[in-house]
């Protein structure tokens, strides 16, 4: 492609010989420059082999400088322009001729969404600028000539015209320039297929996300929470990488767009590692030193990646997060011996999931670097690998849940078998006892008495909560029905108090379960001191919830008891490791004269509603249930 020569006044022979020398030097380049012939039948035209490249990194040349100087342009023969990571300032040019008798319109596509700046210049054969376009992910999205997540530039050739197209690409990070020239119809057909696959991918991710959010609220397993974070961040990373996020979510936020790839990839790796740690039970597993060291080192990856995202330059950030992602995806290989031995089928699905993502990343890199053929699989390798990842991880979690259920079922079967053996042994003992009854009557009577005492003690133990020593919920349910029927028979008021330790989950998370157990025992002791009547019942209802059943007590009397309990606990200084920790309790109170003998649970509902209202109004208070006014 001829360089445009500036017209400097050089006297006489010197001007002539300089012109001859310039023509001699540049004539091989002119002869070697290919001319791309286009017509109305040109649909998809690859530009590899049809264009030249000039690397001006560090020099920062303008269009005029590129035209005016003598530069070493090189013909691009690689199947795909991929130059790795770095700081790049490259010029490309190609010449195209409209061989048809009609005007021709083509679309120049750069199918890579993370180029900082891409300037397109259209010149006539004499080197005069006809039109230019400036694009890039560091410019607002609205400045693109065609609103597309890739960079699309319309080009026009009048009938028989020749145009020189200059492309100035500047970027920091990964330099890829997949250039293609399309007719409008061919591009629309190709882009429809591409957008359809993108829609299927993001739609599938959304469905999996919603399903697992519902599953988390159903089973309350932390693994599902980490998995939901993974499924949320992974498609956001893909959307940022492919330009969809810049197009639809933050078209003006160019600075954030530069960091979004690192942010979402870091979050994806973070949730993936948290999921792996919880899914494989590495916190409690008996693992070897190699695996333990590997998991500890892996825990530092998200911290390093997050630090570079927040504070490092873009190239350092991109290099770090890519290396971190490769290491994180390789961790399942380190855990394979441990996982296959201890987790069985669930780990096999887990291993296949991360292998699919790793293979998808390798195929994507091979496609970008032209090491693998360009087809629908390699072009969408990241989407395919991430889809297989979330599907296989979902199957792995289902397999682990089934394995847990199977283990529980087998444990129940073993317990039933032991019970059957115990019953058989007891029957045998009874037969022996019956045969020896006459001669060992005194001994049998003594044994019978001991058995009765043991059964009584066992019954008492079965009605007690092992942690606090209070009566348990089963005993409370039985006593509630009994007192409710008695209240109905004698038309006496029955009162019920529900109590819940305020913010106990946060207390447990901060100080640990052992301190939490001590706290439950302390609260049980304090409440026992406030219950003095012989017929009243204090029980642990479940977790940090307690209940007090007060037969023959009206609403005001029950409220007085509840207030006494609240003040006793609030005034007691609870110490943790020598430091006082505030401890309060919320109580809901209700009382009624039973109208029937079969509606004891209505009393529980009212007390629970009053407790909920006490929590809602700010905790550390007593709320009585208000009966709806009769109409």
Image (cartoon, rainbow, N blue to C red):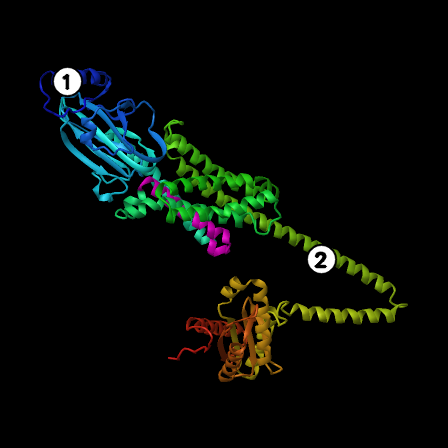
Range covered by the magenta-colored residues: 216-243
Quarter of the image that includes the N terminus: top left
* Vertical side of 491 occupied by 99: above or below: above
Per the image, the residue denoted by label 2 is 419
Task: Between residue 419 and residue 383, name the one nearer to us.
Answer: 383
Q: Residue at x 64, y 70 (%)?
A: 464
Of label 1 and label 2, which has the lower sequence position? 1
Q: Is residue 222 magenta?
A: yes
Task: Identify the element where label 1 is drawn.
Answer: helix
Q: Is residue 190 above or below residue 434?
A: above
User: Magenta stretch mostly in which secondary structure?
Assistant: helix
Residue 344 image position (x, y, % from top left): 59, 42
Residue 156 drawn at (x, y percent): 16, 29
Q: Would you say residue 52 sits in the magenta stretch?
A: no
Mark 2 Cα-neighbour bin, 10 Å: few <14, some 14–19, many ≥20: few
Q: Which residue is mark 1?
A: 19
């Amino acid at each position: 492609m001829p360089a445009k020569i500036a017209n400097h006044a050089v006297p006489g022979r010197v001007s002539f010989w300089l012109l001859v020398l310039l023509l001699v030097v540049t004539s091989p380049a002119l002869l070697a420059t290919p001319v791309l012939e286009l017509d109305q039948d040109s649909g998809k035209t690859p530009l590899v082999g049809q264009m030249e490249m000039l690397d001006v990194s560090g020099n920062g040349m303008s269009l005029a400088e590129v035209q005016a100087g003598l530069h070493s342009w090189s013909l691009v023969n690689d199947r795909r322009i991929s130059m790795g990571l770095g700081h790049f300032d490259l010029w490309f040019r190609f010449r195209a001729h409209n061989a048809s008798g009609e005007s021709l319109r083509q679309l120049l596509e750069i199918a890579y969404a993370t180029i900082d700046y891409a300037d397109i210049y259209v010149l006539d054969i004499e080197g005069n600028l006809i039109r230019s376009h400036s694009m890039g992910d560091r410019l607002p999205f609205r400045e693109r000539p065609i609103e597309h997540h890739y960079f699309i530039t319309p080009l026009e050739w009048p009938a028989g015209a020749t145009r020189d197209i200059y492309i100035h690409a500047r970027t920091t990070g990964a330099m890829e320039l997949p250039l293609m020239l399309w007719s409008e119809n061919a591009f629309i057909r190709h882009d429809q297929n591409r957008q359809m696959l993108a829609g299927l991918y993001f739609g599938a991710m959304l469905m999996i996300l919603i399903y697992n959010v519902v599953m988390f609220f159903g089973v309350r397993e932390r693994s599902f929470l980490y998995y939901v974070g993974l499924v949320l961040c992974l498609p956001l990373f893909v959307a940022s990488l492919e330009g969809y996020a810049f197009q639809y979510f933050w078209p003006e936020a160019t600075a954030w767009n530069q960091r979004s790839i690192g942010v979402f990839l870091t979050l994806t790796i973070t949730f993936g590692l948290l999921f792996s740690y919880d899914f494989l039970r590495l916190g409690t597993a008996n693992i070897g030193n190699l695996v333990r060291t590997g998991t500890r080192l892996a825990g530092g990856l998200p911290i390093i990646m997050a630090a570079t995202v927040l504070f490092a330059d873009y190239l350092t950030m991109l290099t770090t997060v890519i290396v971190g992602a490769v290491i994180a995806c390789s961790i399942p290989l380190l855990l394979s011996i441990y996982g296959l031995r201890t987790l069985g089928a669930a780990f096999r699905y887990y291993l296949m999931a991360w292998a699919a993502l790793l293979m998808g990343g390798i195929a994507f890199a091979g496609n970008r670097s032209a090491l693998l053929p360009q087809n629908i699989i390699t072009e969408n390798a990241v989407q395919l690998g991430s889809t297989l990842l979330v599907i296989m991880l979902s199957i792995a979690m289902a397999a682990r849940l089934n394995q847990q259920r199977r283990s529980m079922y087998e444990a129940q079967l073993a317990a039933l078998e032991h019970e059957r053996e115990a019953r058989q042994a007891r029957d045998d003992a009874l037969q022996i006892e019956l045969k020896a009854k006459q001669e060992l009557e005194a001994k049998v009577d003594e044994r019978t008495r001991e058995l009765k005492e043991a059964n009584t003690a066992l019954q008492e133990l079965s009605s007690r909560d092992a942690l606090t020593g209070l009566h348990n919920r089963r005993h409370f349910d039985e006593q509630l029905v009994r007192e409710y029927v008695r209240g109905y028979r004698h038309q006496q008021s029955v009162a019920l108090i529900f109590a819940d330790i305020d913010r106990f989950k946060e207390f447990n998370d901060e100080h640990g379960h052992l301190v939490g157990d001590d706290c439950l025992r302390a609260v049980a002791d304090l409440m026992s001191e406030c219950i003095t009547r012989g017929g009243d019942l204090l029980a642990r209802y479940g977790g940090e919830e307690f209940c007090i059943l007060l037969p023959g007590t009206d609403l005001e009397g029950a409220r007085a008891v509840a207030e006494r309990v609240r003040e006793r606990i609030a005034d007691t200084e609870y110490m943790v490791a020598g430091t006082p920790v505030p401890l309060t309790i919320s109580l809901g109170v209700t009382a009624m004269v039973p109208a029937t003998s079969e509606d004891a649970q209505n009393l529980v509902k009212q007390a629970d509603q009053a407790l909920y209202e006490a929590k809602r109004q700010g905790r550390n208070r007593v709320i009585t249930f208000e009966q709806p006014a009769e109409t």
